Structure formats: C-alpha cells, structure tokens
C-alpha cells in the first residue's frame, strides 16, 4: 500500500512570478526556494484565476472559478464567506480521509475559523507586517514559521498531515527586517522593500526545509509553493485587479514523492491546487481545475485557460481644463491566456490582444491602431472561439456572452 505523504503548502501574497532566482531574477537572493525548485515541478506558465486576494484564495481552496464560488471582491467583516455561499473547501474532505489539517497565516475569506481544521492560527487580513513579540515587535512571517516548526515537531508521528503556511508579504505595506535591505538599497534597484520581503520569505522557507531534512525516511513529504496573484508595482491599472501579466503570473512549485522534477510549459492556475492536494491524499475532488501532476505528465492536455476579473474603471468629471475623480465602477473581464498570447475582453472598453512571446511587456495591443493586422485578427478569432468553448464547459454564461459578442464583431472585420 502506498504511504500517503505529509503535505506542506507555503503560500505568499502578491508575489510576482519573476521575483525569484530560479525564475531568472538576477538581483534577488532566494537560495532556499531555488533549491526547492530544483527538486520540483516548475510551472513556468502559472497564473491566478482572479487577480485579487479573496477571489483567488477561494478558487485555490475550492478549485472553482469565481462565478461558481461566488466571491468577486475582498472579504471583510463576516465570519465565513464560503460557508455563507454554500461552498466547501478541500480541507474537510482531507480531514475526513484521515489527514490532520493546519492553517497558519493569512486566510482572507472571513474573520472566523472555517470548517476542516485541527489546528487554526489564521487571520483574515492585516494592516502591518509586524506583530508583538518578546522584546518588541516580530516580523509576521518569522513568528508564523516558528509556529509551523513547533507544529511539525508535534506532528512528527501519527496520521499524515496538511500544513498550510500562508505568509502576508510581499503584499503591501512592503516591509521586512532591516537585515534584508542592504542587498537592495542604494544600488538603483527599484522596489527594494518588496525584494527584501521576498529575501526574508526565502529565509523562512530555508528554516522549513532544514526541519524537513531531519524527518524519518518512512514519512514521505510533498511541498507546494505558490502565491495568490502577482503585482504590477502600481503600473497601469493598479497593483492587482488587472489583466496585466505582472498581476496574473505567479510562482508555482510542486515537489512530490515519485514525481520527476522539471519545467512544465502547460498553462495552469491556482484552480489546479485543490485537485492536486486531493490527488496526493487520495480524496475524490471535483473542480474546474486538474491535478498538477497529471498536467505535468501529459495525462491532462492544456493549451489555454480562462482568467476572470472585475477591474475598476475610474469615473471622472471634466470641467474645462479641470478633471475631478469621482470614484470607480466595477468592470467584468474575461481573459483567455495561453502563456504565448492573451485575449482580454472587458464588458466596457476596448478589447486587447497581446503576443506575449514577442511583446512580454504588453506594449502593443494588436487590436488597436497601427498594430492591427490580419494575423492578429485571425489569432483573436481563434482565442475567442476557445474562450467560448471553455466558458460553455464551465457554465460561465457571462464569459461566453462576452466572447461571442466579440467574435461577431471580428466576423464583420474579417469580411470587410
């Protein structure tokens, strides 16, 4: 009989996919995460299903798109948003299958303790990266890592466990202990505090890996690393709620017993994490996502996926030369993303098509002005057709309607 592994899932908040050494960043120091990556499946084309904290996290733990789980904005001031909406996470199912379950860190799906946990040290959200500690204040991730190490020692024997360690950084306010700043300050590198926080997270991961190395050999261990969404550094439409790749792309690693490490090019998302946890623990879990190990070995074919978003459209009043911001309006968007190309369809405003291979900074919208050409129109038509098919399969009527309307307009252009 196969021994089911213990599972540690380390999650960060608002971490860019390109913020780590293994992903090609030459400025940041992340030796411990890089070492984990060397023994893991490295998903090079991983994205959030929704570029905002609470909707992304709901998708992560249910495996469902936002139109199914019902959360499209950040959650504050209620005990359990998913329970209110009648949506279950994977945790009770794993608990019922004999796993001990623990959660430490940011949750952002409600103020109370949700169902499915033997150990709960979560919180909804925070306004500071620091907490009270002996002799003063302690950086939140270091306190949470201490708690995780104590739990690992306590749970070293007995039934298998799932431990989620959900760090708040590098989410704003960008901050970290002073010892992580010298590498990044004074050298002309922007966003020094962000990368100092990434450096600090790496040190925390190093402590976890050191503890994992002392485990008995008869207890297999799986380790996952991910973030809820990326960060545009306030460029364009904001740091998140954006269709920009900087907000969509995330780091995603899976280290699992018997799984050969290597790069995986297939597009994947956080919706694939809950099915992966279910697969590792022997739980049957139906979701919009798939087990990442099955995507990696080709059992599940992937050539594109749908990302959902509710962006915020600025509303202003102009009187003569004066322009006054009045507020923002929510704007539904659907994105079909392949890793090499991206079609963005907002319910209001112009659509966008980007050749991400040739234009990774997304400066040339192939559906606007001098960048329009027949090859781009043909590609847009193909991606819209694939979006319609994907949205129909997952009963996303709004996404299907947006893509169908766009495709009808394209037909007129192609006939002309």
Image: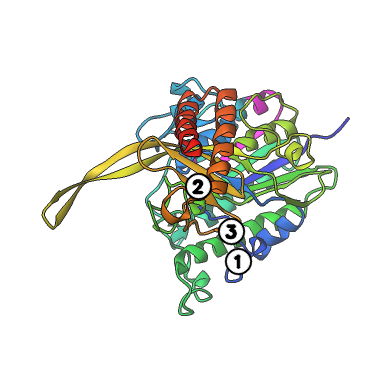
Magenta-highlighted residues: 93-109
> SS for tag 2?
strand
Number of callouts in the render? 3
Q: Between residues 197 and 22, which one lies in front from this camera angle?
A: 22
Number of residues whose C-alpha sits closer than 10 Å to that of mark 2, classed few (under 14), some (14–19) or many (20 or more): many
Q: Quadrant of the N terminus?
A: top right
Q: Which residue in the structure is indicated by mark 1?
A: 25
The Cα atoms of the two marked residues, 3 and 1, are separated by 20 Å
Q: From this viewpoint, is residue 119 visible?
A: no
> SS for tag 1?
loop
Number of residues whose C-alpha sits closer than 10 Å to that of mark 3, classed few (under 14), some (14–19) or many (20 or more): few
Q: Which residue corresponds to the image point at 48% horizontal and 27% vertical from the top-left?
A: 67
Q: Are marks 1 and 2 in contact (CB under 8 Å)?
A: no
> SS for tag 3?
loop
Place of residue 190 in the rendered image (x, y in percent of width and height, measured from the top left) = 45, 70
Compared across the picture, whether 5 is left or right of 2 comes to left
Marker disc for residue 353: 2
Determine whether 390 is above or below 17 in the image. above
Q: Sequence order check: which comes first, mark 1 or mark 2? A: 1
């Amino acid at each position: 009989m196969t021994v089911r592994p213990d599972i540690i899932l380390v999650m960060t908040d608002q971490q860019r996919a390109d913020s780590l050494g293994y992903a090609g960043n030459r400025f940041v120091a992340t030796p411990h995460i890089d070492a984990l990556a060397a023994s893991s499946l490295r998903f090079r084309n991983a994205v959030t299903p929704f570029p905002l904290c609470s909707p992304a996290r709901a998708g992560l733990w249910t495996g469902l798109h936002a139109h199914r789980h019902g959360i499209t904005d950040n959650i504050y001031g209620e005990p359990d948003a998913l329970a209110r909406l009648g949506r279950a996470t994977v945790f009770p199912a794993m608990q019922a299958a004999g796993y001990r379950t623990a959660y430490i860190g940011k949750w952002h799906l409600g103020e109370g303790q949700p169902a499915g946990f033997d150990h709960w040290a979560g919180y909804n959200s925070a306004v500071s990266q620091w907490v009270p500690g002996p002799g003063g204040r302690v950086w939140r991730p270091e306190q949470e890592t201490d708690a995780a190490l104590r739990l690992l020692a306590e749970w070293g024997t007995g039934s298998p466990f799932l431990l989620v360690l959900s760090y708040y950084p590098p989410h704003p306010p960008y901050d970290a202990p002073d010892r992580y700043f010298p590498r990044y300050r004074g050298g002309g590198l922007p966003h020094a505090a962000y990368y100092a926080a990434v450096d600090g997270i790496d040190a925390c991961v190093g402590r976890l890996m050191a503890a994992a190395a002392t485990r008995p050999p008869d207890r297999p261990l799986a380790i996952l690393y991910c973030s809820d969404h990326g960060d545009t550094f306030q460029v364009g439409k904001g740091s998140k709620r954006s269709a920009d790749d900087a907000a969509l792309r995330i780091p995603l690693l899976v280290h699992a017993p018997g799984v050969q490490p290597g790069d995986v090019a297939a597009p994947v998302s956080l919706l694939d994490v809950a099915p992966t946890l279910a697969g590792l623990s022997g739980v049957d879990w139906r979701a919009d996502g798939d087990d990442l190990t099955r995507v990696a070995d080709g059992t599940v074919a992937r050539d594109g996926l749908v990302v959902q978003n509710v962006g915020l459209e600025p509303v202003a009043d102009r009187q003569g030369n004066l322009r006054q911001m009045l507020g923002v309006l929510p704007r539904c968007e659907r994105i079909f993303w392949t890793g090499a190309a991206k079609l963005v369809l907002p319910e209001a405003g112009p659509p966008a098509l980007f050749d991400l291979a040739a234009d990774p900074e997304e400066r040339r919208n192939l559906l606007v002005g001098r960048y329009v050409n027949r090859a781009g129109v043909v590609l847009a038509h193909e991606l819209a057709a694939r979006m319609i098919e994907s949205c129909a399969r997952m009963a996303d009527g709004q996404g299907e309607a947006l893509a169908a309307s766009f495709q009808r307009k394209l037909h007129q252009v192609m006939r002309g």
